[in-house]
Image (tube, helix red, strand yellow):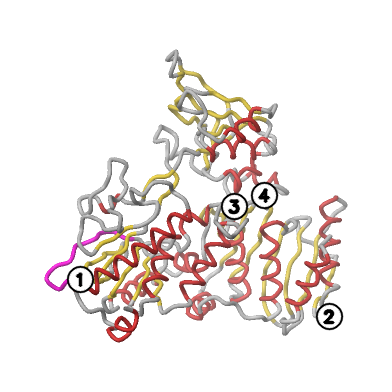
Amino acid sequence: MLEQDLKTQLAAYLERVVRPIHIVASLDDGAKSAEMRELLEEIASLSPQIELALDGDDARRPSFALGTPGHDISLRFAGLPMGHEFTSLVLALLQVGGHPSKAAAETLEQVAALEGDYNFETYYSLSCQNCPDVVQALNLAAVLNPNIRHVAIDGALFQDEVEAREVMSVPTVYLNGQVFDQGRMTLEQIVAKLDTGAAAREAEKIAAKAPFDVLVVGGGPAGAAAAVYAARKGIRTGVASERFGGQVLDTMSIENFISVPHTEGPRMAAQLEQHVREYDVDIMDLQRAEQLIPAGADGLVELKLENGASLKSKAVILATGARWRQMNVPGENEYRNKGLAYCPHCDGPLFKGKHVAVIGGGNSGVEAAIDLAGIVAHVTLIEFDASLRADQVLQRKLRSLPNVTVLTSAQTTEVLGDGAKVTGLVYRDRVGGDSHRVVLDGVFVQIGLLPNTEWLKGTVDLSPRGEIMIDDRGQTSVPGVFAAGDCTTVPYKQIVVAMGEGSKAALAAFDHLIRTSAPAASSAVAEAV
């Protein structure tokens, strides 16, 4: 089942385990159980530390549990963890086998100290790039703390459960039978929700920090590049981000980043963070900016955070990125994650054999419709303009598919539902003016991005689209405040463009510092210039 190269690599990883691993599989007579048995037998053959039993009695079949003698660990995979989840399986094997996690020691201590009773269930899809982060975080938590139990469930395989619980978005996490959260989450985010005092303690630590020379707000490609370029100048650099990686984390496939023929968003996001951490950069993740206060008599720009803490810096680089643009029609917010979604790669498998719509005729919308057409019964693509805006090669592929209907000059006016899930939508024919109702099981919105700049209104100049207005050096209307990436007026919202803009903003910020005041690390600055 596994390629020989993958077996060789996995065997090398398993040499790192320091204690036995017991795998107990619960199987039935189905084809998927046969596949699971083959997979587990191959894995067991790769290490003398692994013992496999096929007599499990769990109600979910096929599934298997991982454990080790003398440790109370409740960790289970329901379904075959292949695709994006194969890494989750490898990490679980290593951690159950005693290989230490690379997570921050402080976070690991927080997890181990949690008291209570936590029974987690995570529904994932094998094509979801956000799901492994959640699965891996909760698996690690289950290894560290006997009060935490976790089952990772392939929603496409356990379709009856998905329908009974009306799961329409992955990852969806249940805690003790109730929905805990949906979407990508890190271990730190999960712990913050469980440990109610964590946010206050973190706010106290942040408030006590000395002023920075350069403070970057945002951890996407622009923010990461800015942090690296600033730190290389030897000055005190900080990054405050809501989630390191930004929009890249939601990108399935990246094929236009020069010198890298293909990669995936979460992998690139991890590499960005790793690169930044190679320098002396103070990364403050899970921090949402609330207010920017221009420099006063002390020459320091102040950034207020949602948790009540404040940071000060001689120069600030705004790289807050963008998010999926909403339609802003009745029913959209009510049915989000209840049949209305923004990531076809993640949630598409949950709509197998059903009828869905894609809103948007640009490259993203047409690519989504093409991908979904291979999973669902029928796709209706709805475009506001008179013609599609996607590349011609994509349009030709789309129109060749027999289970796709394309509607142009169509304005979506309402998302319909029965209170629990999406049942359809209403669109208006922009030519004739008539309204039409389409019966659907799901709606995927792909209409572009909206800059994360609402909190800056009245402080820096924004364009009519809400983008931060910058000059050719990345300078905003506020002295000492620069901006870069998708949140700005720079054209072409691309990863490679954002990285260049972030680097340029950092160089401009450094130039501002040496012309207005002496940075803290004066000796390093002198050497750099």
Q: Quadrant of residue 301?
A: bottom left
CB within 8 Å, label 3 to label 1:
no
| Residue bearing mark 4 | 155
Q: Residues within 10 Å of mark 2 (few under 14, many from 20)?
A: few
What's the residue type where badge 2 is placed? Pro
Q: Quadrant of residue 95?
A: bottom right
Distance between the alpha carbons at the discs numbered 4 and 3: 28 Å
| Residue bearing mark 1 | 300
Residue lying at the far left in this picture: please name it: 297
> From the image, which quarter does the C terminus lie in?
bottom left
Q: Earlier in the sequence, mark 3 or mark 1?
A: 3
Tag count in the figure? 4
Q: Residues within 10 Å of mark 1 (few under 14, many from 20)?
A: many
Distance between the alpha carbons at the discs numbered 2 and 1: 60 Å
The correct choice, above or below, for 406 with respect to 206 in the image is above
**Part of the protein shown in magenta:** 289-300
| Residue bearing mark 3 | 255
Residue 46 or 30: which is nearer the viewer? Answer: 46
Q: Earlier in the sequence, mark 1 or mark 4?
A: 4
Q: Residues within 10 Å of mark 4 (few under 14, many from 20)?
A: many
**Residue 344 in the image: x percent, y percent?**
58, 43
Residue lying at the far front in this picture: please name it: 529
Q: Residues within 10 Å of mark 3 (few under 14, many from 20)?
A: few
Distance between the alpha carbons at the discs numbered 3 and 2: 40 Å
Q: Is residue 220 left or right of residue 207?
A: right
What's the residue type where badge 3 is placed? Glu
Residue depicted at 15% across the width and 73% down the height: 298
Secondary structure beneath label 2: loop
Secondary structure beneath label 3: loop
**Residue 441 in the image: x percent, y percent?**
59, 33
